[in-house]
Amino acid sequence: MPAPSEEPRHYRGIDPFTDEQIDLWVVDGVITREPVAAARTAVDGGWIIPGMVDAHNHVGIAPGLGVTIEQARGYAHQDVRAGTLLIREVGSPLDTHPLDGDRSCPRFIRSGKHIARPKRYLRDYGVDLENPDDLAAEVTRQARDGDGWVKLVGDWIDREVGDLAPLWTRAQLDAAVDAAHAEGARITAHVFGADALPDLIAAGVDCIEHGTGLTTDLMDAMVERSIALVPTLIQVENFPGIADGADRFPTYQANMRKLYDNAAAVFAAAREAGVPTFAGTDAGGFVEHGRIVDEVEAMAAVGFGARDALYAATVAPREWLGAGLLGDGDRADFLVLDDDPRVDLTTLRRPREIVCSGLTVA
């Protein structure tokens, strides 16, 4: 990453969400809205947006596992170069907290490890509970290891059934949600199919990851309970390949292909229903890091349009996660763009400048 530039700097541009002029001063890695006389004007013109948020990312995961902290740092830097300056890391076998001291990394908000059951998720990715009634106790442990989130595996292939199936009973989920909230944490769940969703939503989880099996009644329930959705559209593009590799389970194959075929319509309907929806790539397994713009463009293509897709990757998730925007005292995380992103999202691929914790990246 580039060497730090710590002199006070002034940035002037347009907020594409309000069309108002923004004046920011960056001092010691944070933003002030009060003029700083000694500041050098680094940018005067263009558009300024908060650093993008990847609301579903795993810098501590890569194919083959065994990720070291230095490899995770490299993945984080790759995301920064794409404009991702805040990552919600929803599950990792590696404790990535040591990256918090590196100002050239994004800010992180983490869950602990994935919570699953034996042979019901990817091997060695998380905690496998032999006794599913231990779920609430494990949620408490993982809440204390995270930064305000806990991640459940809500469904996965059950080889005895030959298809996606829930991992937990409603009673176990009720206890898990209560345990997370008692720790001041929010709880989210990986769900591809349809069967696990009713109990998860009724139990009051705070977010659904992927959500390709959602129906209109479940969307309405999510709106009523303020449950968010992170659809990971570019991960859903891998569903046909996952199905192709599952010849032993033809029912599962057919289900995954159907979920893929219906995904765009499901996500468009969720948006129309008013489900709070945020951009996330699911980088770290099948998806490479640094692809947040691909996710924004995919959201735009399923009905969000350029402005709302960009909003779902910047302002909206920062408000949802309680992270800073562009206010006094906020960490200086923002992008300067040459063109109006509401007109041309590809401008996100060639930012004039990326400022990460006050450091100039590009």
Image: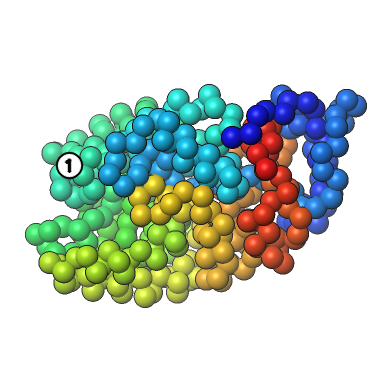
Farthest residue, direction right: 37
Depth check: give the residue in front, 167 or 87. Answer: 87
**Left or right position of 243 against 83:** left
**Left or right position of 50 against 246:** right
Q: Secondary structure at mark 1?
A: helix
Depth check: give the residue in front, 327 or 52. Answer: 52
Pinpoint residue 156: horizontal percent, then vertical percent.
Answer: 23, 55
Placement of the N terminus among the 4 image quadrants: top right
Pinpoint residue 180: horizontal percent, then vertical percent.
Answer: 36, 36
Which residue is at a point 63% across and 34% down the rendered structure image? 2
Task: Answer above or below: position of 153 versus 233.
Answer: above
Which residue is at a point 26% across and 33% down the rendered structure image? 138
Pinpoint residue 343: horizontal percent, then vertical percent.
Answer: 72, 67
Q: Is residue 136 visible?
A: no
Type of colouring: rainbow
The crowd level at tag 1 (other Cα within 10 Å; few <14, some 14-19, many 20+) is: some
Task: Answer above or below: position of 296 versus 89.
Answer: below
Q: Is residue 212 visible?
A: yes
Q: Which residue is mark 1?
A: 132
**Left or right position of 293 against 75:** right
The part of the image, by quadrant, that contains residue 218 is: bottom left
Depth check: give the residue in front, 187 or 328. Answer: 328
Q: What amino acid type should be assigned to the residue bearing mark 1? A: Pro
Farthest residue, direction left: 160
Pinpoint residue 51: horizontal percent, then vertical percent.
Answer: 63, 44
Q: How many marks?
A: 1
Placement of the C terminus among the 4 image quadrants: top right
**Left or right position of 122 against 319:** left
Which residue is at a point 28% across and 52% down the rendered structure image? 154
The part of the image, by quadrant, that contains residue 354 is: top right
Which residue is at a point 29% across and 55% down the rendered structure image? 199
